[in-house]
Image (cartoon, helix red, strand yellow):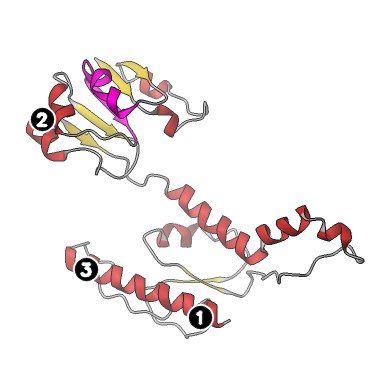
């Protein structure tokens, strides 16, 4: 059985252990990158195709006679013709919860960067402002401490970000599924049936509510 990873460099910078893939019992071939024009040739004799960003349309799927499984190294499946795969009996798998921890970490990285004006102070330092200051200190941008503040989280990352904020300084996390006082860093919003199964109607209501919450949060931040 032969498997190919068409764009391995999109998920690794020589820092991913591929032993589990090699131990899966297939003859694994890794390509750092594959031009779209070369996909047909590289999957021609493959039983399993792994990709992150390349398109697998009907013509490509139908041209790979041995193809049995497409593994996507991401959450989305929009780059694969699912209808063509179903017609050929080809399974398509994605990665549930892909990069959830990384996204949560990025949320707090951006939060701290904004509250500490990291980029603004970095620019001043590079411009020699600290050295030129008669008191060797810079107070151009106020630094906000998180302790005692309220954090409004909007979106599907909500639950995980709420859980993972615990090691940070003591501040409360306000979800978009309830009421709150309309003050800075708080969001006032009602989400109906937020915990119900994601039917189309409920999902639409949730998106609308999250958009409203985000707009309110921006208004509060701009109002100071």
| Residue displayed at 7% across by 33% down | 87
Which one is earlier in the sequence, the residue at label 1 or at label 3? 3
| Residue displayed at 11% across by 35% down | 84
Identify the mark at residue 202; answer none if there is no mark.
3
Disc 3: CA contacts within 10 A as few (<14), some (14-19) or many (>=20)? some
Given residues 5 and 182, the one toward you in this image is 5
What range is drawn magenta here? 35-52
Q: Quadrant of residue 211?
A: bottom left
Question: Pointer 2: what residue?
Answer: 89
Q: Quadrant of residue 137?
A: bottom right
Q: Do the residues bearing badges 2 and 1 touch, measured as CB atoms within 8 Å?
A: no
Is residue 48 a member of the stretch shown in magenta? yes
Identify the mark at residue 2; answer none if there is no mark.
none
Given residues 65 and 197, the one toward you in this image is 65
User: Where 198 sits versus 187, above or below?
Assistant: above
Q: Quadrant of the C terminus?
A: bottom right
Task: Give me the C-alpha separation between circle 1 and circle 3.
Answer: 27 Å
Task: Give me the C-alpha separation between circle 2 and circle 1.
Answer: 52 Å
Which one is earlier in the sequence, the residue at label 2 or at label 1? 2
Identify the mark at residue 220; answer none if there is no mark.
1
Q: Is residue 64 left or right of residue 143?
A: left
Q: Position of residue 7 (x, y in %)?
A: 38, 28
Q: Is residue 219 left or right of residue 83?
A: right
Q: Position of residue 194 (x, y in %)?
A: 29, 69
């Amino acid at each position: 059985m032969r498997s190919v990873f068409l764009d391995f460099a999109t998920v690794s910078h020589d820092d991913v252990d591929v032993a589990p893939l090699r131990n899966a019992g297939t003859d694994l071939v890794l390509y750092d990158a594959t031009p779209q024009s070369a996909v047909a040739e590289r999957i021609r004799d493959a039983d399993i195709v792994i990709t992150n960003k390349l398109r697998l349309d009907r013509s490509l799927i139908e041209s790979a006679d041995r193809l049995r499984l497409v593994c996507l190294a991401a959450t989305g499946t929009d780059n694969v013709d699912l209808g063509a795969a179903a017609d050929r009996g080809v399974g398509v798998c994605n990665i549930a919860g892909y990069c959830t921890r990384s996204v949560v970490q990025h949320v707090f990285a951006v939060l701290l960067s904004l509250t500490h004006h990291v980029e603004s102070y970095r620019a001043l330092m590079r411009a020699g402002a600290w050295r030129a200051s008669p008191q060797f200190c810079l107070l151009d941008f106020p630094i906000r401490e998180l302790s005692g503040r309220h954090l409004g989280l909007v979106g599907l990352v909500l639950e995980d970000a709420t859980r993972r904020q615990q090691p940070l300084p003591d501040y409360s996390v306000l979800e978009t599924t309830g009421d709150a006082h309309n003050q800075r860093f708080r969001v006032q919003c009602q989400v109906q049936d937020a915990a119900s199964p994601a039917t189309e109607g409920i999902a639409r209501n949730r998106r609308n509510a999250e958009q409203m919450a985000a707009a309110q949060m921006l208004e509060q931040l701009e109002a100071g």
